[in-house]
Image: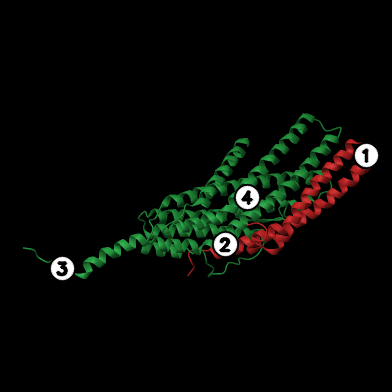
Chain colours: A green, B red
Amino acid sequence: MRREVYFPLGFWVAPLGMILCLAACAPLRPAPFQTFETAVANGQKGLAAEMARDVEWTRESDVDALADSKDAPLSQYMLKDAQGYAWSMPATAPHWEARLTLRALEDLNAGFLGYTQLLTRVAQGVPQESEDLEALAAAINKNLRDAGDTILQAKNRPNLFPAGAAAFSSESLLAFKRQGRAKKLRAAVQENQPWVESYATQGLTLIDIIRADLKAAYADRMESIHARWDDKRAPGRNTLARSIFNLNAEYADAMDSLKALSLFYNGLPKAHADLAEGLARNAKPQKALTDLAAFADQVARRTRELEKAR
Amino acid sequence: MKGKDAKKTTGDLTVLSLPLLESLSESRIAILFLARQAKEAKNNALAKELTVRGQSLRTEIARLRRSVLNDWSKETKRLIAQAGWPRPG
């Protein structure tokens, strides 16, 4: 005997809803986020290394300029006040400005790297206590505040941070943790896109500044070598000749490295946008992200060579 | 991101001054090269004249460089202020 079995409406609706949800919600793939994080770390390290080279070259040309003038006002380059940990000097030498810029860059980079780490962790879906996220948030915030302090020190101004200043939307990332949907993570990444574009532009501007700085320092240092070469009393022509060749080789390496960095920072915003695209249903291959990783590898290779040469 | 796009977030001063700074630095290298060639051709008067011109360029480069770095710092500060997280209070 056949029995007619009637299923309640909810029996169909619930699985259908699950299937629809699975179709609508793209899976979270942490790999692209890890690629992005690694690429950013390599790119940042490369830019910091070139900025450090800028500090070193500018310092050398400051040394030459000061040494060339017997009547130089040395009082301008000594401590005027030294009380506790505080100190001041009448003049700020160009290499000191470059040094402060390097510090600001390091702090800003740490903040941005923290953001990429947070994205990776969220995409990995590793169960985390909210305290962990809060600690990471506090670390990011501290780096950014440190960067602000360094800049303010450079400009000798009072602290201008508005108490309520915040637009770097990690709050939406926390919302994602609560709701666990790719759509939310995608929205959070998209919300931060303008900030990432500004960050990349700052990187590109700094690359242009370093390039101009190195050219100025090259002329200063070469002029100083020429002056010593022409001075019949100055010994050590071999040393001077070696200095000329070393300077040219370093200049060539620096231009190669800055070119690679320029490709990296140009590609950064698009790669970040790719992260969001990758979370969409029917996601296309993330070409910009692949390109960014390749540029970052080039940068990393040059950074290693620079480190080896030192 | 360079050129037109860079204007979106980089200060106007940097957009205008940075290419000039680089151009002056390149000119200084070219002048130094010519001064050296003049010296090697035993034209000491020309070498001296070119060296003086190079020195005056150096002063202008130092001035521009300072304004460009200040502008970069100002822009970075703005960026950092936007990025403060978590929202205080």
Q: Which one is in front in this view, the residue at disc 2 or the one at disc 4? A: 4
The residue to which callout 1 is attached is: B43
Residue A262 is tagged as 4
Identify which amino acid the numbered label 1 is placed on.
Asn
Q: Which one is in front in this view, the residue at disc 1 or the one at disc 3? A: 3
Residue B21 visible to the viewer: yes
Chain ID for label 1? Answer: B
Residue positioned 15% across, 68% down in the render: A6
The residue carrying pointer 3 sits among few (fewer than 14), some (14 to 19) or many (20 or more) residues within 10 Å by Cα, namely few
Q: Secondary structure at mark 2?
A: helix
Q: Which one is in front in this view, the residue at disc 4 or the one at disc 1? A: 4
Observer-nearest residue: A55 or A177?
Answer: A177
Do dots 2 and 3 share one subunit?
no
Q: Which residue, as the protein is rendered here, is positioned at the far left?
A: A1
x and y percentages locating residue A164 in the rendered image: 53, 70
Identify which amino acid the numbered label 4 is placed on.
Ser
Residue A6 is tagged as 3
The residue to which callout 2 is attached is: B80
The span from disc 4 to disc 1 (Cα, nearest Å) is: 41 Å
